[in-house]
Image (cartoon, grey):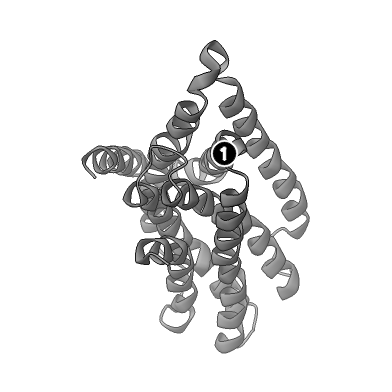
Amino acid sequence: MNWKLVLGMSLPFVGTMIGVLMVFFVKNDIGTKTKKIMLGFSAGVMMASAIWSLILPALDLSSHLNKWSFAPPCIGFLLGIACLVIFEKISSKFDISSPNLSSKKLLLGITLHNIPEGMAVGIALASAYFGYAKLTITASLLLSIGIAIQNVPEGAIVSLPLHAMGMKKSKAFLFGFISAVVEPIASITTFFLTSLISTILPYILSFGAGATIYVIVTELIPEAQHDNFYPATLAFATGFVLMMILDVVL
């Protein structure tokens, strides 16, 4: 398998594990300002990647439909949003903010959140690798990079609260690992499924875009912008512009 594929599927997992490992080195939670800047930057990266690496290729693949070329991307995008709404409804029953929450519920809530992110990476990589869209492997890595950056604080959100609730660091690390490993599994599964169903790739690409943008709008931006923290806005703009430039140059 192409080393870039391995890298793309591994980066989100690595990002999560960096956050999970903080349980061994950080006594307290990540600084609020640092976390907001990271979330703002990753939101910008992911937004640019969703547009240039998923939505635009989906429109290109649908161009043979002429004036109806918008239909497959729109349908797929809305399905991606709907899927994440369902995931949100399920995971909301396992509220990770409660200090009395059991470790199993915490693990399930984070794991459910990570699955669609892995799917989005698998879709982008498959599209580039099998030549279904005008998309390079390097360009598809941008989405993986954005998710990896976002996953660093998410990994810490798993391990640090568990340890704070009295769990041993080694066990908190194990639970964090379990929540992280679902992403490469989802990426690999979606990668091979996409190769078998290339005829509906515009729907799949835009589905991944919808799922990605849902996470950006409902989670990353609100948390980064809490209390009108303007450096997070600048971080968003920086991430967006940087990935836009890289997508064109590479």
State the quadrant of the C terminus. Answer: top left
**Residue pictured at 51% horizontal, 67% vertical:** 155
**Residue pictured at 49% horizontal, 51% vertical:** 126
Across and down, in percent, residue 238 comes to 28, 41
**Tag 1: Cα neighbours inside 10 Å, few (<14), some, or many (≥20)?**
many
Query: 8 left or right of 76?
Result: left
Q: Secondary structure at mark 1?
A: helix
Is 70 placed above or below 27 here? Answer: above
Q: Quadrant of residue 147?
A: bottom left
Q: Amino acid at mark 1?
A: Leu
Across and down, in percent, residue 78 comes to 64, 31
Q: Nearer the viewer, residue 170 or 77?
A: 77
- The answer to whether one can see residue 76 in this image is yes
Labels in figure, total: 1
Is 239 placed above or below 115 here? Answer: above
**Residue linked to disc 1:** 201
Q: Nearer the viewer, residue 214 or 185?
A: 185
State the quadrant of the N terminus. Answer: bottom left
- The answer to whether one can see residue 102 in this image is no
Query: 168 left or right of 11?
Result: right
Across and down, in percent, residue 168 comes to 60, 88
**Residue pictured at 61% horizontal, 69% vertical:** 179
Across and down, in percent, residue 12 comes to 46, 62
Task: Give the residue furthest to the top.
Answer: 67
Query: 59 left or right of 207?
Result: left
Q: Nearer the viewer, residue 118 or 196?
A: 196
Q: Quadrant of residue 175?
A: bottom right
